[in-house]
């Protein structure tokens, strides 16, 4: 599935994104399952607030980490997230 | 209770907690995984006991929580326990037959913080569902499934498959679609507890199983992206066993209604484990130090052919309960494995089931109820 750059991104209502103290990482929880996230994936998902579009997420994270050229990686991860139902558009 | 951890195995924290709140259940499924003699365990943990157990396990890192039974809805304190679990940060799941569920309860549990509800349906037709459940429940279950969806929960539909309903696969899939299931669990019966007792009448033939699987696989592609399918294979038709519980004492913790802590929900039947009770020890002590949880950790316990097998890190020798039920030796390789010297018992079971089908005077299914359970006490 591909990301529509016009539409806002929102985290799924039927999944939960949560910090796990015992594992020292963010996880996604859903029926019968759990996905452990690395830091950059978690940062991207936290931006999916139902308002921001792909370009907004990219600029927010480039600013936050004082870097450029994140578009390609963020888009690739969001496609995975969309296919897995973690986010919606 | 020190002394059972030999320190050679690195102990990982529990991630999944299965809280079997009660053995009480209005249904009588002949494949129920509860112990045959469940009627002899009469005591149930109190609300405060459960809260303490939830807190202790959460602190160790458990995060997925299943409320099950029996029928967990028979516990009046369920909303209270759900609320406590939510406050602790669990992702909680109610595993229910739907019996006794009302819209009011669904809303109340949602407000308390329940994350999802798994409704089991026995078949795709009223007649067969009500026969297998031993209780008229079909229409109500469908209604519950709709209400679960209506109130914003992810809806998980679970159908246990066996010889009496496996031919309904196309109708079961159509029903799941019609009800709008987000997840469909197609669970081939695992032969423990009551299912072991009724195996001759429940085990499908290989042809039936393969046909049903092919239909389910084809369907899976048509619903990709809208419905997720979990397919639990019947391991009698595999030649390697399942990696039972993801490894003994590595991930899963089950607490039985009376507070007994189990490394897997059927471990209660294994001899000599001395399964500890949460009334006597903390979850931390139980997980790290008890005899039961250290019993099959690592691979020191293994015999041949597992001990020298290059696949032992993949399946840990399979399921100990299955080895015990089928060979009488819980240290043996799971006989599902084609390398097991006792692998022949699997074919014998398949043949026996086949014979039972052809035989005119089939012995009847033994339904799971207190009257029958008392026969095993
Ligand atoms: S399998 Fe059937 S009888 Fe057993 S607890 Fe579940 S609903 Fe009740
Ligand atoms: S011999 Fe034992 S360890 Fe090897 S594949 Fe079979 S069950 Fe698994």
Image (cartoon, coloured by chain):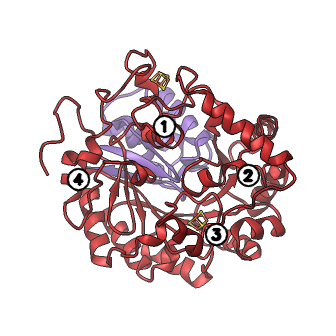
Chain colours: A purple, B red
Say which chain tag 1 marks.
B
Q: Secondary structure at mark 1?
A: helix
Q: Nearer the viewer, mark 4 or mark 1?
A: 1
- For image coordinates 37% across by 20% down, the residue present is B307
Q: Which mark is residue B286?
A: 4
Determine contact: label 3, label 4, CB under 8 Å: no
Residue at far left of view: B2
Front residue (pair B233, B359): B359
| Image x and y of residue A38, in percent | 36, 35
Q: CA distance from mark 3 to mark 1?
A: 26 Å
Q: Are marks 4 and 2 on the same chain?
A: yes
- The first of marks 2 and 1 along the sequence is 2
- The first of marks 4 and 2 along the sequence is 2
Say which chain tag 4 marks.
B
- The first of marks 3 and 4 along the sequence is 3
Q: Is mark 3 within 8 Å of ligand 1?
A: yes
Determine contact: label 4, label 1, CB under 8 Å: no
| Image x and y of residue B139, in percent | 77, 75
Q: Is residue A1 visible?
A: no
- For image coordinates 30% across by 54% down, the residue present is B275
| Image x and y of residue B204, in percent | 75, 43
Q: Which mark is residue B28?
A: 3
Q: CA distance from mark 4 to mark 1?
A: 24 Å
| Image x and y of residue B30, in percent | 65, 61
Residue tagged 1: B323
Q: Are marks 2 and 1 on the same chain?
A: yes
Determine contact: label 4, label 2, CB under 8 Å: no
Q: CA distance from mark 4 to mark 2?
A: 38 Å
Q: Which mark is residue B201?
A: 2
Circle 4 packing at 10 Å, graded few (<14), some (14-19), many (20+), is many
């Amino acid at each position: 599935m591909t990301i529509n750059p016009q539409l806002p991104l929102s985290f799924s209502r039927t999944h939960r994104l949560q910090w796990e103290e015992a594992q020292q990482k963010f996880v996604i929880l859903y029926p019968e399952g759990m996905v452990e996230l690395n830091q950059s994936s978690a940062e991207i998902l936290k931006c999916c607030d139902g308002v921001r579009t792909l370009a907004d997420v990219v600029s927010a994270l480039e600013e936050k980490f004082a870097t450029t050229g994140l578009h390609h990686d963020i888009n690739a991860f969001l496609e995975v997230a969309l296919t897995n139902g973690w986010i919606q558009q | 209770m020190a002394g059972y951890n030999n320190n050679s195995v690195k102990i990982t924290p529990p991630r999944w907690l299965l809280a079997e709140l009660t053995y009480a259940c209005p249904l009588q499924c002949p494949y129920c995984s509860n112990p045959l003699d469940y009627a002899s365990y009469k005591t149930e943990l109190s609300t405060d006991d459960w809260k303490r157990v939830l807190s202790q396990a959460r602190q160790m890192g458990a995060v997925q929580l299943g409320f099950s039974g029996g029928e967990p809805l028979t516990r009046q304190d369920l909303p209270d326990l759900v609320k406590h679990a939510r406050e602790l940060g669990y992702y909680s799941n109610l595993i229910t037959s739907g019996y006794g569920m009302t819209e009011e309860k669904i809303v109340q549990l949602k407000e308390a913080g329940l994350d999802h509800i798994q409704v089991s349906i026995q078949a795709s037709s009223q007649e067969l569902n009500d026969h297998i459940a031993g209780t008229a429940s079909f229409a109500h279950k469908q209604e519950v499934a709709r209400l679960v969806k209506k109130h914003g929960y992810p809806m998980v539909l679970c159908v246990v498959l066996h010889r009496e309903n496996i031919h309904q696969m196309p109708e079961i899939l159509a029903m799941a679609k019609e009800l709008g299931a987000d997840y469909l669990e197609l669970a081939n019966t695992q032969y423990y507890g009551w299912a072991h007792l009724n195996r001759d009448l429940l085990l499908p033939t290989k042809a039936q199983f393969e046909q049903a699987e092919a239909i389910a696989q084809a369907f899976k592609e048509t619903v990709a992206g809208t419905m997720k399918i979990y397919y639990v294979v019947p391991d009698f038709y595999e030649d390697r066993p399942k990696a039972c519980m993801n490894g003994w004492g590595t991930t899963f913790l089950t607490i039985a209604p009376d507070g007994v802590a189990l490394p897997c929900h059927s471990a209660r039947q294994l001899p000599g484990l001395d399964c500890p009770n949460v009334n006597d020890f903390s979850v931390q002590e139980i997980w790290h130090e008890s005899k039961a949880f250290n019993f099959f950790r690592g691979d020191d316990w293994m015999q041949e052919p597992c001990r020298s097998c290059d696949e032992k890190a993949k399946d840990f020798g399979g399921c100990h309960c299955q080895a015990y039920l089928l060979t009488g030796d819980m240290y043996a390789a799971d006989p599902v494995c084609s390398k097991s010297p006792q692998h022949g018992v699997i074919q014998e079971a398949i043949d026996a089931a086949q014979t039972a089908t052809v035989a005119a005077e089939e012995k009847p299914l033994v339904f799971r109820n207190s009257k029958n359970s008392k026969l095993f006490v």
